[in-house]
Amino acid sequence: MKKLGTSETNIERVFGLIGKHMEVLKLNILNPNWRLSVLPIVVFALIGFMPILTAFSVRKYYDFLEIIVECLTQACTGMQVFFRSYFYLCQRDLCRQIVEEMREQRISYGANRSERMERLFQRATERMMFIYRLIYAMYCGSFFFLLGPLIMPDPRKSSLPLAFRIPFLPPDENLVYWCLNYMHHIMLNVIGIHHLAPMDGIVILALISTCTRIGALQQMLEELDEQITVAEWQQTEHLEPYLDRIIELNSDMKRFVGLVNSTFEMHFFSVFTMICLIICMCLNVIASQPKNSIYPLMMASICQLLVICLFGNILLIANDRLPASIYGIQWYRLTLAQQKKLLFLLANAQPDIEMSAVFMPVNMTSFVTVLRAAYSYFTILH
């Protein structure tokens, strides 16, 4: 049997790991004492240099459609990093608030007093750790693109991994220039991974946290039902504080969802916009040259969108189960006043809880819509 408090230790490990990855770029905003230093300024300068680098590279590879598209898709990823940088610059307090609420939620739901509730949060924190490690591993998979010159050398790019060249440092003229360009590619990849992975990790963990809160409410409703069973018919006044606590926690859960959605709505919009552009540009190349090396890049972009939409859909499904759990208790054995309270709780639980990307919800329906639109675009190209 696991000791109480294990989930508290594990949640600290999860955010400790995220903070460690943020620290690679000295952007550990989970630390209340974080201040802007030299390395973050260099990072933001490199991100701001992306449009100039893209314009130079497109002009350089003007005659090669596949390489231009590769360059533009990498630029879209760079623009996603650029637009979402305000997470680190302007949303530090909101990020810390979300993380702090995730740390304290087990106490709010009484996991420190109930072994059954503690097991629920223990399983949730184990899932959080696994999912975040998986997300980080998926982002680190982009390092395989840096091995491209070894697997499929392309003399048109002077065997560089990406279609980027630092202006006035032509890699085909000098070995030192080639090494500087290659190191620049590695640096861009490291920035992309440790800029986006912690950010997307916090988004996904917040969605898992919300699902856990819904599961905890369902468990509390089950416990309420057990107490109703042993009570006399409509002699349940002693259960009033417990019912009020459930109503209060449900309202707090809805407030937390609103906080997460308002914080990350523009991030979701940025992801949808940039990935749709990347998919369209990749399909342009595939339509004209079916045999090329653009497929892994397109699949990586689709996977990023899939992960976000999948967990948004899981949240939607989890919330759909809550009204059934409320109606499933023996409400007819409660007092009339308690039945009215339960009716308000049921009405509050029925509206869908979902994340928004400004113009569309973040769920699997939107993901399928994007893929269907991409397929239609591909058929038109043919």
Image (cartoon, rainbow, N blue to C red):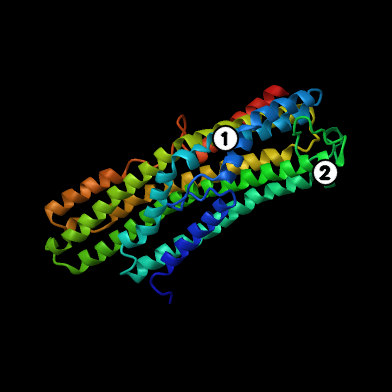
Mark 1 crowd level (few <14, some 14–19, many ≥20, 10 Å Cα): some
Question: Dot 1 corresponds to which residue?
Answer: 82
Task: Name the amino acid, label 2.
Answer: Pro
Which image quarter: residue 106?
bottom left
Q: Residue drawn 42% across and 40% down?
A: 263
Mark 2 crowd level (few <14, some 14–19, many ≥20, 10 Å Cα): some
Mark 2 → mark 1, Cα distance in angstroms: 27 Å
Q: In which quadrant is the C terminus drawn?
A: top right
- Check disc 2 and report its element: helix, strand or loop: helix
Closest to the observer: 213 or 186?
186
279 above or below 242? above
Find residue 271 and report its horizontal and vertical position in percent.
Answer: 55, 36
Find residue 267 and report its horizontal and vertical position in percent.
Answer: 50, 37
Q: Are marks 2 and 1 in contact (CB under 8 Å)?
A: no
Closest to the observer: 234 or 71?
71
Find residue 158 and report its horizontal and vertical position in percent.
Answer: 85, 36
Find residue 105 and report its horizontal and vertical position in percent.
Answer: 35, 57
Which image quarter: residue 373?
top right
Residue 247 visible from this viewpoint? yes
Closest to the observer: 354 or 304?
304
Question: Dot 2 corresponds to which residue?
Answer: 149
